[in-house]
Amino acid sequence: WDPIQNPTNVELHTLSSTSPEYSDVSDAFLSTLDRSGIKIQSIQRVQNLAMWQSYVVKRQTICFRDNADQSDAKALLERGERRWLWHGTNLEVLDRILQQGFNRSFCGKNA
């Protein structure tokens, strides 16, 4: 992450097209498509400290709940299994998603 200016705000950071993070994201995204005619304009990282902290706590809870043996749970945390999720939406709901995350109450509103 880049330094956070205000921890109560959501921040968008445009990635440099020469950064390893940009390459990882673009390669993962393009691997799901027919690449012909696809040009990525930009990639932005969303930095939402409150949502990140919530994610970390929930992830720890799941790892420790599903593994009574503390060493197994710690191994799961270290492995860091995560999956990419690509989600399209429109500009009207984008700000709510950035602030609150995905919420089923947005369902049917292109969220």
Image (cartoon, rainbow, N blue to C red):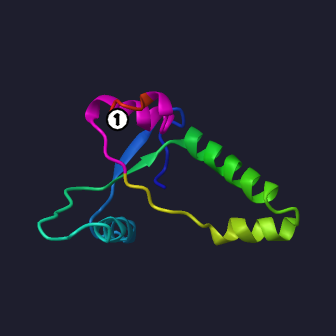
94 sits left or right of 2 in the view: left
Task: Report the magenta residues as a range.
Answer: 87-105
- Amino acid under label 1? Leu
Where residue 95 appears, as percent x and y from the top left, is 37, 32
Q: In which quarter of the image is residue 70?
A: bottom right
Vertical comparison of 28 with 107: above or below: below
- Residue ranking furthest to the right: 69
Nearest the eye: 111 or 14: 111
Identify the residue position indicated by label 1 in the image: 94
Nearest the eye: 47 or 87: 87
Nearest the eye: 79 or 104: 104
The reply to whether residue 9 is in sight is no
The reply to whether residue 34 is in sight is yes
Where residue 71 appears, as percent x and y from the top left, is 84, 70
Where residue 30 appears, as percent x and y from the top left, is 28, 68
32 sits left or right of 105 in the view: left
The residue sitting at 34% across, 35% down in the picture is 94
Where residue 49 appears, as percent x and y from the top left, is 55, 42
Q: Specify whether residue 44 is painted magenta.
A: no
Magenta portion: prevailing SS class: helix
Q: Specify whether residue 94 is painted magenta.
A: yes
The residue sitting at 16% across, 63% down in the picture is 39
Q: In which quarter of the image is residue 22?
A: bottom left
The residue sitting at 21% across, 69% down in the picture is 34
Crowding near the residue tagged with mark 1, few <14, some 14–19, many ≥20 C-alpha atoms within 10 Å = some
**Kind of element beneath mark 1:** helix
- Residue ranking furthest to the front: 108
- Residue ranking furthest to the left: 37
Q: Quadrant for the C terminus, please.
A: top left
